[in-house]
């Protein structure tokens, strides 16, 4: 079948962070890009709403230029670092914190981030098809024909950025994966002046609650656990210190839930189809690295598209996923074993420089090798 004159170079299914980042990066390579999404903007989703410094760096690198200026005129909150708080019901609760080494991170509402990405993509000439749910795809010799509930589109390259239950992955036969964790997240906003400029991670035997200040009068709380919390109120009952902080606040809007997977796909490309973002595998939400992954993958994918060689993306994707996956597994070990968690938090409290080093490594400021064997011995006792 001839794709015809109306075919795009790149059609992206999914206009979430991964799809929009990918659209920006590909359009900057001079490609004609279209995005199709079942919803319409601004698209919201359960998320902790924290952008680590490396996420911001990756965002600037794909072409969201003058990011500092944009952030100075939109609602968000500077994030100075990460604070871990152990079980607050114990007589001597453990607390440790580490500042980000160079630039701060940002807490930013999901819908605000979506609008920033959307504006940048539109300024680069990306075409959007909102409220179009993709129903099927048909590969051809020259590309792919895509059928939505409203129209038929043709493209040379098809990108699946359609989230963790990606239908593009299923249609392309790219679902072979190893799943190392499956948990459930619940997000709730609270109207309150943030009491900290750290992302606070509260640990308990019932999962984690992490707090991200995202404006001068709002915090976002994400609860992550193995079992579904029936409500944010029920979730808070496991985190008394956090409940105390929030006593004078009001929940703002409804809670939103979502699954969070630690998942690695065997392959993320096939012929002229590539997967990106959660569609291409993911790390547990507690890492706060989901969006950094999307943005880094977008940069790598745009280079592969320009070179007309998706194998380059397959290799880069594997590299990009490696460290966050390791961190995700380590944090989940702390979730599963109260004893290990206690040992690690106690060690961090005693030797805060170790927590600082690990945070640097987590956000890519320090290569793995620089965490010396000495530091690992301190950690394991
Ligand atoms: C509770 C929780 C907390 C998190 N906290 C953080 C955090 O603090 N920091 C961080 O960096 N990451 C965090 N993450 C991870 C982050 O939210 C994800 O990595 C990110 O949303 C992935 O974006 P995406 O674009 O790949 O997928 P999505 O955001 O899921 O977007 C997929 C898009 O595809 C569209 N779509 C799906 N199917 C179709 C179809 N058939 N046709 C058309 N459109 C379709 C959907 O409408 C949607 O807009 C968190 C995740 C969870 C669950």
Image: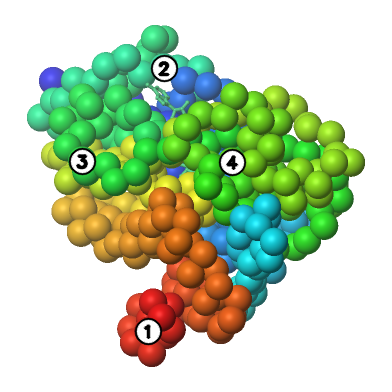
State the image coordinates of residue 37 (x, y, percent, origin top left). 46, 25
Residue pointed to by mark 4 = 223
Does the rendering let one see residue 74? no
> Mark 1 Cα within 10 Å, few/some/many (few <14, many 20+)?
few
Q: Is residue 136 left or right of residue 124?
A: left
Q: Residue at x 71, y 31 (%)?
A: 233
Q: Which of 373 and 240 is in front in this view?
A: 240
**CB at mark 1 closer than 8 A to ligand 1?**
no
State the CA–CA distance, disc 1 to disc 3. 33 Å
Residue pointed to by mark 3 = 177
Viewer-nearest of discs 1 and 4: 1
Instruction: Report the colour scheme.
Output: rainbow
Quadrant in the picture for residue 324 = bottom left
State the image coordinates of residue 10 (x, y, percent, origin top left). 33, 38
Q: Residue at x 15, y 30 (%)?
A: 173
Question: In the displayed image of the protein, which residue is found farthest to the front?
Answer: 91
Residue pointed to by mark 2 = 133
Residue pointed to by mark 1 = 377
State the CA–CA distance, disc 3 to disc 2. 25 Å
| The C terminus sits in image quarter | bottom left
> Mark 3 Cα within 10 Å, few/some/many (few <14, many 20+)?
few
* Lower position in the chain sequence, tag 3 or tag 2: 2
Quadrant in the picture for residue 274 = top left
SS at mark 1 in the image:
helix
Viewer-nearest of discs 2 and 1: 1
Q: Is residue 284 above or below residue 103?
A: above
Q: Which residue is drawn at 86% across and 50% down?
A: 193
Viewer-nearest of discs 3 and 2: 3
* Lower position in the chain sequence, tag 3 or tag 4: 3
> Mark 4 Cα within 10 Å, few/some/many (few <14, many 20+)?
many
């Amino acid at each position: 079948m001839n794709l015809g004159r109306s075919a795009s170079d790149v059609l992206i299914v999914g206009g979430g962070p991964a799809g929009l980042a990918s659209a920006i990066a590909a359009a900057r390579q001079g490609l004609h890009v279209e995005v199709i999404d079942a919803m319409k903007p601004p698209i919201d989703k359960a998320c902790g709403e924290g952008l680590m410094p490396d996420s911001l760096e990756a965002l600037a690198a794909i072409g969201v230029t003058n990011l500092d200026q944009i952030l100075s005129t939109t609602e968000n909150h500077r994030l100075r670092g990460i604070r871990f708080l152990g079980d607050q019901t114990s007589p001597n609760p453990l607390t440790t914190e580490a500042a980000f080494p160079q630039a701060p991170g940002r807490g930013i509402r999901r819908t605000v981030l979506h609008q920033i990405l959307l504006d940048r993509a539109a300024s680069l000439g990306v075409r959007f098809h909102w409220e179009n749910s993709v129903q099927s795809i048909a590969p051809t010799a020259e590309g792919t024909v895509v059928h939505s509930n409203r129209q038929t589109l043709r493209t040379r390259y098809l990108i699946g950025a359609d989230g963790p239950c990606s239908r593009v992955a299923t249609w392309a036969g790219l679902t072979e994966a190893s799943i190392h964790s499956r948990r459930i997240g619940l997000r709730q906003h609270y109207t309150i002046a943030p009491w900290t400029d750290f992302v606070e991670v509260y640990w308990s035997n019932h999962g984690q609650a992490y707090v991200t200040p995202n404006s001068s009068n709002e915090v976002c709380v994400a609860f992550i656990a193995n079992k579904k919390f029936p409500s944010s109120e029920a979730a808070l009952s496991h985190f008394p210190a956090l409940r105390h902080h929030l006593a004078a606040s009001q929940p703002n809007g409804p809670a939103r839930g979502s699954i969070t997977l630690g998942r690695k796909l065997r392959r993320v490309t096939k012929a002229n189809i590539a997967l990106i973002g959660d569609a291409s595998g993911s790390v547990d939400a507690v890492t706060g690295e989901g969006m950094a992954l999307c943005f880094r993958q977008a940069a790598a994918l745009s280079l592969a598209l320009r070179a007309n060689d998706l194998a380059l993306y397959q290799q880069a994707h594997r590299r990009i996923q490696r460290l966050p996956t390791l961190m995700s597994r380590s944090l989940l070990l702390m979730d599963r074993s109260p004893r290990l968690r206690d040992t690690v938090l106690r060690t961090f409290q005693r030797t805060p420089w170790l927590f600082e080093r690990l945070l640097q490594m987590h956000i890519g400021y320090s290569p793995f090798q620089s965490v010396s064997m000495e530091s690992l011995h301190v950690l394991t006792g």
